[in-house]
Amino acid sequence: MPMLEATGISKAFGGLAAVSKVDISVNEGEILGLIGPNGAGKTTLFNLISGAIQMDSGTAVFEGKRISGMKPYQICRLGIGRSFQAAKNFDGMPVHQNVLMGALFGKKGQSAANASKIVDEVLDFVNLNELRDKMVHDIPLASQKRLEVARALATRPKLLLLDEMMAGLNPSEVGEAMELVTKIRDSGITIIMIEHVMKAIMKICDRIVVLHHGAKIAEGAPQEIAANKTVIEVYLGEC
Amino acid sequence: MIYKFNFRKDVQYIVVAAVVIFFAFVPLFGSTYTLTLSSTIMMYIVMSLSWSMFSGPTGYISLASGAFVGLGFYASGFLSSSLPLPMLMLVGGLVSFALAAIIGAVTLRLRGVYFTIFTFCLVELVKAVMTWYEIMIVRKRGLNVRNFGTDTAFYAMLVMVAITLIVVVVIKRSRFGMALTGIGESEDAASHIGIHTTRTKVFGFAISAFLMGTVGAVRATMLHHIDPGSSFNMMFSFLPVLMCVFGGMKTFLGPIIGAAVFAILQYNLITEMPQIYMIIFGAIMILAILFMPTGIVGVYERVINRIKKGKSKKGGTDDANA
Amino acid sequence: MSTVVNIVIYGVIMGGVYGLIAMGLTLQYGVGKILNVSHGEFLMLSAMTSCTLVKAGLHPLLSFLICLPAAFIIGFIINITIYRYLRKVSKDEATFESNAMLMSFGLYFILANIGLKIWGTLSKSYQYYSYPVKILGATIAVNRLIILAIAIIFIVAFFIFLNKTRIGKSIRATSQSTTAAAMMGVKINRTMAICFGTGGLLAAAAGVLIGMALSPTAQVGLSNTVIALIVVVLGGMGSIPGAVLGGLLIGLVGQAVSFIDSSLVMVANYLMVLILLLLRPKGLLGR
């Protein structure tokens, strides 16, 4: 049984279908890539799964529990973490406190001592330990993106939704981000990632889903996707 | 939380505690005028502290203070003949708490600007309901309130200042306070790391309403007679905002300093030239937002930091963002 | 029957005036993200000035020519001074939005008390076509009908201004996306200042109309701001047609409820918006 199974998810904004009848599932231990041109509905799909907005129709089931209709905080506590495309860190707090927030609130009844232990672990894991006392706006973009991930990791998720964590990074930073993603997977966390950096997607994903105009147009292993005619037409052809 | 003592930050709490203790002795030597002025200052301190407790970290600007203070007024108006002062305060607080919880539950789900509009209209609404009640049901304008004596009112206010200070400090250091701050910094991120944002906001708003309701109840006993116009007064809604903007709403001392300054200004100016006083209010408000976004406390910290710059680099305080 | 006609006619008249006020408010918010709590004070200052001028011998319609340009200029200047500076020093849109609103409280204090200082708390009024006529069995003062006619003229003129003129189009573009409009060559700062000024002008127009028949005092500002806010939330924040529709609705409901008990109008308005927000948070015509 897949870890997360969403069937027939649809969402329209003012009559315009942003996501229509999308089926998506991810197996435990997998890295699933989610690609598609701008406006294809990728982030909307993340918002629907994580409960930021409610779906018009369809269901999402996570580890046997129906999560459609739940609030974001409930979904988070069940074990789905997410990062945001435009970094949404707590700008008024230092780096370590950003992570602490995730650790404290991510699981119900987390003790303070336990939470600060998680902070140390996570900061180590994502290599942000040297910047731990800096304020968010004093650290570079690549680190801010890592902090997004760190905050989500601190909630101790089983499934992590990563929204364009490589956008705006230079090639060497992209390499580091790729390493981080594989490292997260190796630590036992399943991942769905939205990404425009093709090189990264093709290399680290086990499976890829392609969205176009809100609908799923292809699904398969990276090589299959790279060879798929429709995909090349709507997406890769653009590059 | 694990907390490290930090002299520069914690000395302010000690100073404030000392001032509160000193105030306890004022009735021994102060005149009635001093006592009334002090009671007003203390009422404003409670109002601005409890306002900043919620609106400071979350950024949701509430203009309902006038409604909560007014409910406190009327709790005393209805019950002062039969209940002792602490009970009046409790009732005033609880009614305000309940109203805030209802309004918050509906409007705090929406964007901040809706919340402000609704709280703004709430004062007029409660005033309208109360006026209707007096005209149509009891057919008598206003209510008389029992006076418990200047000293009693003074000590009641002092107790509320102490309680409010404790509540503010405890919340600031608690998980609940962190959740409020998280909501203000980035509500989306907060909800996705497991914070029940709506419940946190509603509860925070209701606690601040409770505190305002209690001081409203005390205030009414100092006035002998109340009516909807004097109770549900828009000025009570604007004042805490102004005091906090002037003093610095994200700091601990800012709301206290702002409240003291404006209470004293008000006492000295309002009887002789009320309009001029209000125009000065407005001008201060605009200038404070433009030129001291972190309030007078922020300005002070910046000056101190500049003086210390030779010794060490700029500290980790967040005086750059308001 | 005549009661219903009365309620409808008076409701539409008040609706037109409310629509005018709310259009100004929603324009200032929709384009410049300034929730202007001092909006009603523009109305008050204009109503009182107009009454004073008419008492001194000016024709009521001519007072438009003084109050409207004055309100526009004051709004324009306020925008290019304090609001432009605030926009420059704000770190992001959300900070600007909340500080802009706080600053309008300051403006409210200043403008409201200038009014009180000049005129005190007594009401002003003058006689202008104040004799009644009968329409469908209802008795209506002629000046109310004039108010309605002028309000409609202003609303229609404003729609034409937004849709047909170059500056109107740039206003609509800016309200959609400031960044995109700037890239298309719209002068953002100037557009915003014009919007703020126009908002003040619309409030001033409503002010002159109120002066014609409703004996304003220097204290009418705040209550009109409250009504405008309710209308704007009802119609959808930033939506100009929404403001007109919301104005009509609030006007009609207000007249209907005040036929039962005038002190319950505010309660009815508030409950209406509260219920609407639960069902449709964007307002009737909100995007």
Image (tube, rainbow, N blue to C red):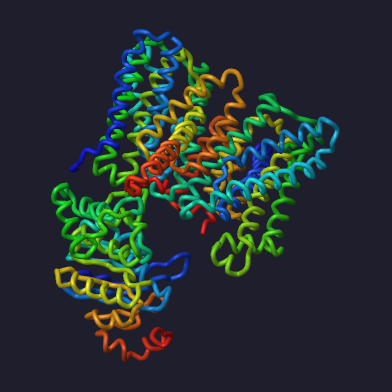
The image quarter in which residue A206 lies:
bottom left
Residue at figure coordinates x 24%, y 85% from the top left? A221
* Quadrant in the picture for the C terminus of chain A: bottom left
Query: How many numbered marks does the figure carry?
Result: 0
Is residue B133 positioned above or below A149 on the image? above
Is residue A191 positioned above or below C281 on the image? below
Residue A148 screen position, x and y as percent:
29, 62
The image quarter in which residue A11 lies:
bottom left
Residue at figure coordinates x 32%, y 13% from the top left? B25
Residue B177 screen position, x and y as percent:
29, 42
Q: Nearer the viewer, residue C184 or B31?
A: B31
Q: Nearer the viewer, residue A239 or A157?
A: A239
Residue C123 screen position, x and y as percent:
70, 27
Q: Is residue B79 left or right of residue C58?
A: left
* Quadrant in the picture for the N terminus of chain A: bottom left
Residue at figure coordinates x 58%, y 65% from the top left? C182
